[in-house]
């Protein structure tokens, strides 16, 4: 295999162990590119990834309830953040958190459409095994925005202004979402 010395193609290799650019590639005899060199990525972006990957996976998990999907969505969010990294991001943690929340919301909308389509077009419904997670189940039954507001407020311990920024709404809307979400959780959990 010959090493192709082209640099700066912008591709990223994102794994739970780290993130690195695919700056150089090794080409096999068929001409297919294979990533081998992980140099040239901005050190501050690598630091952001190393510090915030696991907290963002936990945040995504609380928003969607599936660990494997949460990891994929967080990786997608890091790729989206990297696309804008060179332009300069003033508050990278907030920008990343917003990207994760928006990616989870997009995934939730897509999942809802898929389930709705299946419900209408399939006669056989598979049952899933019961897992006792009362709070997780109650969170799953909340509307997306209420769930996001509650998770950001009580898990991420963010102030209302940052939650409002992440959700794209006003702080008063955040207060309303949290209040209504907590009321729904109380009704759901307490007999």
Image: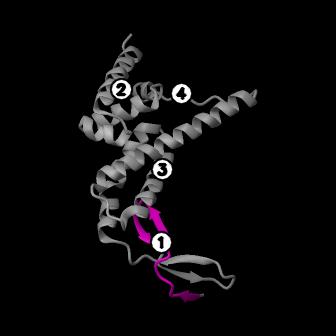
Pointer 3 or 2: first along the chain = 3
Pointer 4 or 1: first along the chain = 1
Residue 73 is tagged as 3
Residue 10 is tagged as 1
Residue at the farthest bottom position: 2
Looking at the picture, how far across and down is residue 79, in whole percent? Answer: 45, 60
Looking at the picture, how far across and down is residue 60, in whole percent? Answer: 42, 43
Pointer 1 or 2: first along the chain = 1
Q: Are marks 4 and 2 in contact (CB under 8 Å)?
A: no
Which residue lies under the disc numbered 2? 177
Q: Secondary structure at mark 2?
A: helix
Going 43% across and 37% down the picture, which residue do you hit? 63
> Is residue 191 shown to the viewer in this render?
yes
Going 43% across and 76% down the picture, which residue do you hit? 38
Q: CA distance from mark 1 to mark 2?
A: 39 Å
Q: Is residue 5 magenta?
A: yes
The magenta-colored residue range is: 2-21
Classify 10 Å Cα crowding around label 1: few (below 14), some (14-19), many (20 and above). Answer: few
Q: Quadrant of residue 92?
A: bottom left
> Is residue 157 shown to the viewer in this render?
no
């Amino acid at each position: 295999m010959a090493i192709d010395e082209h640099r700066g193609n912008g591709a990223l290799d994102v794994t739970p162990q780290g993130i690195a650019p695919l700056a150089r590639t090794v080409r096999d005899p068929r001409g297919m590119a294979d990533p081998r060199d992980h140099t040239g990525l901005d050190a501050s972006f690598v630091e952001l990834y190393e510090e915030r990957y696991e907290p963002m996976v936990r945040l995504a998990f609380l928003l969607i309830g599936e660990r494997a999907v949460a990891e994929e969505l967080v990786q997608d969010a890091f790729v989206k953040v990297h696309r804008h990294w060179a332009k300069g991001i003033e508050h990278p943690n907030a920008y990343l958190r917003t990207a994760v929340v928006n990616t989870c919301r997009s995934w939730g909308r897509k999942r809802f459409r898929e389930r709705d389509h299946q419900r209408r077009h399939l006669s056989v419904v598979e049952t899933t095994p019961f897992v006792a997670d009362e709070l997780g189940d109650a969170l799953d039954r909340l509307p997306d925005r209420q769930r996001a507001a509650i998770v950001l407020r009580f898990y991420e311990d963010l102030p209302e202004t940052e939650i409002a920024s992440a959700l794209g709404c006003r702080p008063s809307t955040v207060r309303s979402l949290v209040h209504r979400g907590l009321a729904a959780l109380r009704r759901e959990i307490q007999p």
